[in-house]
Amino acid sequence: MPMDAKTVKLSLRHICQSYVVGNAVRDAVVDVSLDVFDNEFLVILGPGQCGKSVLLNIVGGLERPIDGGVFLDACRIEGSDPRIAMVFQKLALMPWKTVLDNVAFGPQIAGTDKAVWRAEAQKYIDLVGLQGFEKSYPFELSGGMKQRVGIARAYTGNPEILLMDEPFGQLDAQTRYAMEDEIQRIWQQEKRTVLFVTNNIEEAVYLGDRIVLLSNGPAHIKEIYEIGLPRPRHMTDPDFLAIRKKIADNMDLAI
Amino acid sequence: MNQPIVMSDMERRELLWKRIHRVLPFLSLGLLLALWVYVSQGENARFPSPGATWDRFLLIMRHPIKGLTIFGHVWASLQRVCIALICAWLFGIAFGILTGWYRKSDSLLTPLFTAFRSVPPLAWIPLITIWFGLGEFPKILLVFIGSIPAIVVNTHAGMRFVQKIYLDVGTMFNANARQKLFKIAIPSALDAIFAGIRTSTSAAWMVVLAAEMLGGKSGVGFLIIRGMDSLDMPLVLLSMIFIGLVGALLAIITQLTELLLCPWTRKQSN
């Protein structure tokens, strides 16, 4: 297959989600349809609490939409699917497990042989650069290292789609820049289809092949941007800044 | 190339305070001891002196009461506490998991338990004595009743408030209900369960004394009542000291066990 051949990997069709809040029904997501290409780094950008995480939770099977469907390789999926893994926003590492056991959680649950899950977990621990910390507990790690564990955990089990829900939202600025480079390196080494949610325009333009801009809640798609910039990108590059400005002008303010 | 260590005034003052803080506990203990010596002086003192208490210790080691030295009595109490606690933990943790995790059993059983635990354990003494007399079983039963609320309440709370995000991780990896319970919910409740173990241990040590005061031939509770009945104040004081020491020791042991079995809780306890 030629490099630039784009096959649709994942499709969202007319996704709607609403919640009952008090006596009212509040829409969170309104009619979102979207195609995600194979091995694409797709960024979903939106202000504040606009409903981007809801969208990701629906793809991950953590929530059921009130309308619409998710299609993986053109087949409809319901609930959580082993081909889809998630890097959670809050550090959802289990504090009672070591790094190794956190990373190997998926295969352990699936009942894989110990030798197999050990090797698999080790491969991804090495990939994210945490070798030597296998026996550490999460509380012994820094914020950036914890997020590396989260990334490695999502990678084990070898999913085809990685969902990342503002994974770097709680890191300090320095660590955040470092992790943005890291996630690119990891993704280029182990290509997967990535859906990356963020509210940070700079991060979106730095990482994304395409950016899906969502409106302020209830979320619908405002615009989809193709980011043609070569990697590695530079945040001070004039082209980078131009795209950044174009998106910023179009982005709703979170209230 | 040795550089002389120069300390600023502030650093010097800080160091001084650190030393003072290290000395302060010994100071208060020393004061307590001095007070003890002071109030126990004179012919008509109503309080045994440290020397008299020490002599009483030597005496009970040479002439055991009811065949047991002070250590024998401590051991007798500890045995009751251990048996009752192990039963209370097994039952209480199971009950707490059942009611904390499954909503139906929560609605069904928790009201019963709330009614049960609003009766202080000592209020059971008359009933239990009438039913079972003064033997070994009623004492253990009483300790069991006294230690069950803490372990149930803590386990229940730990299981009830498992963070949703951990369960989401489970859902993400297709964990089934059983795996969510055993691999996620119970481990995440372990620190709450251990808090229950700590509290129930100190409750058990308290109740065993009351249970032993009812009658019997062994235990520190028996010993302290024996001292009272025979106006043997040094014996009373000796028993009190041992009760305090063992209580502190039990607290330290449970804490160390928690650190050993659940090393990740170190962060919270610091």
Image (cartoon, grey):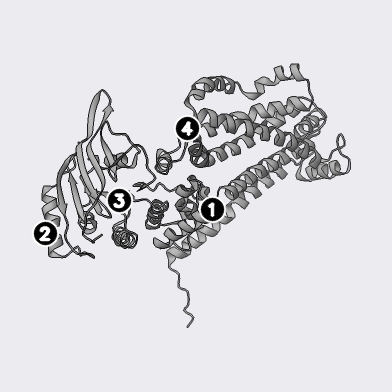
Circle 3 residue? A169
Q: Are marks 2 and 4 in contact (CB under 8 Å)?
A: no
Q: Please identify, in this view, whether the residue under mark 1 or under mark 2 is nearer the observer.
A: 1
| CA distance for labels 3 and 4 | 28 Å
What secondary structure is found at the residue carrying circle 1?
A: helix
Left or right, B79 with respect to A40, comes to right
Q: Are marks 1 and 2 in contact (CB under 8 Å)?
A: no
Q: What chain does badge 2 belong to?
A: A
Q: Please identify, in this view, whether the residue under mark 3 or under mark 1 is nearer the observer.
A: 1
Residue B36's label in the rendered image is none
Circle 4 residue? B160
Residue A242's label in the rendered image is 2
Q: Position of residue B239 (x, y in %)?
A: 75, 37
**Tag count:** 4
Q: Position of residue A246 (x, y in %)?
A: 11, 53
Name the N-terminal-most of marks 1 and 2. Answer: 1
Circle 1 residue? A114
Within the image, what quadrant is residue B227 found in? top right
B104, B87: nearer the viewer: B104
What secondary structure is found at the residue carrying circle 2?
A: helix
Name the N-terminal-most of marks 3 and 1. Answer: 1
As shown in the figure, which amino acid type bears the numbered disc 4? Answer: Arg
